[in-house]
Image (cartoon, coloured by chain):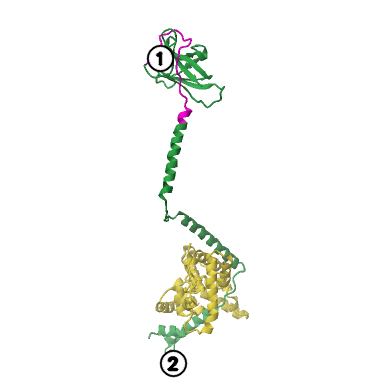
Chain colours: A yellow, B green
Amino acid sequence: MSRPTLCYPWCVMPLADSATLTEKLPLVEEIVLERRMVTRAIDGDHAAFRWIVDRHGRGLFALCVRMVGDRAEAEDLVQVAFARAARRIESFDPTYRLSTWLYRIALNACRDHLKSPRRRERPGDTDSGVLAHREALGDRPDEHLERREQIGRLYAALETLRPAYREILILKDVEERSYEEIRELLGSPITALKIRAIRARAKLAAALEGQTP
Amino acid sequence: MKADERIRRLLDQELSAEDEARLLAEAAEDPALSAKLEQALAMQEALQLLRDVEAPSASLAARSLDAALAAREEFSARRRWIAWLSPRWVRLRVSPGLLALPLVLGVLVYFAGRHTAQTTIASSQRATTEDAPATDAVDTNAAGEPAQAEAVDTNDTEDAPVPVRFVLPASGARSVAVAGAFNGWNATSIVLADTAGDGVFVGTAYLPRGDWTYMFLVDGERWVSDPYAQNFRDDGFGGRNAVLRLN
């Protein structure tokens, strides 16, 4: 059976045009390694799958926690995302980074989960989500309590938003990605993403204001 | 430009220093814009609290790997089945000479089989009169239908008795027996039966090898010679006994 060729010349690699050659070289090595691992994974090499999971597992987990606000659910979604990626790894488009492809799969898994009737009936455990950000809580007890409440309120407000609004807020305001990167992840035009960002921020502000006693 | 778009640009750091200063100056004079701006900045700052996420549980990597490998295995198995079941084009290049070979072999095997089958069926009986009882033996049986006696199998050893199947179509007859030199012309030891009820009497007897004269006794009173026996012998009383040759 023929196998998709993943050996593209480095000039078509997903590199920023502004980067100099010196800046590009480590990235080129990284991308070449990624492609080699994907090729090996297609051949059924377990070590290659382990490399992919080790390299991207934590990033996907962070994304899923922010999306669903629940640690346990996020861990389940990471597994779902890796299972989906393994099933369709032949369809990986080497003009994108592997992380972009995996993030896209994880976002789809989160979206499916948030839209599922079971999840709508029983929202995630935001306390568990708050504990995923232990470092942000600070050391001082009063600060700790205040931030804990703040994160809890934030997750409760995010829970009321549509997944599309939640995505743009997390990708833009939390992960501070560029609109170009978000376009690659979500597949929407940049103008639409900017409009969505304005609406999502307004919705979140309204949801937070609605919580204020 | 609308206020919302200017605030978005401020949050996304797309405003030039001059535009940012102008926006802040306008906000200082417009309480509604100021409130909106403060709310947006506070919200963005709050979202920064979600930046750092603790590491997942230690077993997540192993569980994720297991899930990936299981999914991959399931997918590969399904793909193998699909590949196995999906139709495909096959190109065959056949030499006409090679195509004729199995045909010729088939014809040879068919005729060889027919010849073997013919030789395994023994020929039947023939007649001559030898100590035959004085009867009004005739060439046809009571019904005027052909009768026959056949050795069923001649592949036995020299001394073994040969099974012989006697058949006499005799519609309307009540009984048919075979009497001959092989049973001392005893008309009760070999009795044929009309098992199918169609008037054809059939029976099998095991006889030693040799030439044997015989007759059919119909209804215990009428002697009938086997009309289709190939050999006959005069019985000395004007009639003909059939002769069965078992070599």
Q: Chain of mark 2?
A: B
- What are the residue bounds of the magenta stretch? B117-143
Quickly name the residue at label 1.
B173
Q: Is residue A93 visible?
A: yes
The reply to whether the C-beta atoms of the residues labelled 1 and 2 are less than 8 Å apart is: no
Q: How far across and how far down the image is residue A92, in percent?
A: 48, 69
- Neighbours of disc 1 within 10 Å: few (<14), some (14-19), many (20+): some
Q: Amino acid under label 2?
A: Glu
Q: Which residue is mark 2?
A: B18
Main secondary structure along the magenta-highlighted residues:
loop
Magenta segment includes B139: yes
Q: Nearer the viewer, mark 1 or mark 2?
A: 1
| Amino acid type of the residue tagged 1 in the rendering | Ala
* Crowd band around label 2 with a 10 angstrom C-alpha radius: few (<14), some (14–19), many (20+): few
User: Up-down: is B141 above or below A105?
Assistant: above
Residue drawn at x 40%, y 85% is B3
**In the rendered image, residues at marks 1 and 2 fall on the same chain:** yes
- At mark 1, the secondary structure is loop
Q: Is residue A3 left or right of residue B142?
A: right
Percent of width and height locating residue B236: 44, 8
Q: Nearer the viewer, residue B222 or A193?
A: B222
The quadrant holding residue B148 is: top left
- The picture places residue A148, in percent across and down from the top left corner, at 57, 76
Taking depth in this image into account, of B180 and B66 the one nearest to the observer is: B180
Residue in view at x 54 percent, y 71 percent: A36
Q: Position of residue A51 (x, y in %)?
A: 58, 70
Chain of the residue under the numbered disc 1 shown in the image: B
Compare residues B226 and B104 and report the one nearer the observer: B104
Q: CA distance from mark 1 to mark 2?
A: 133 Å
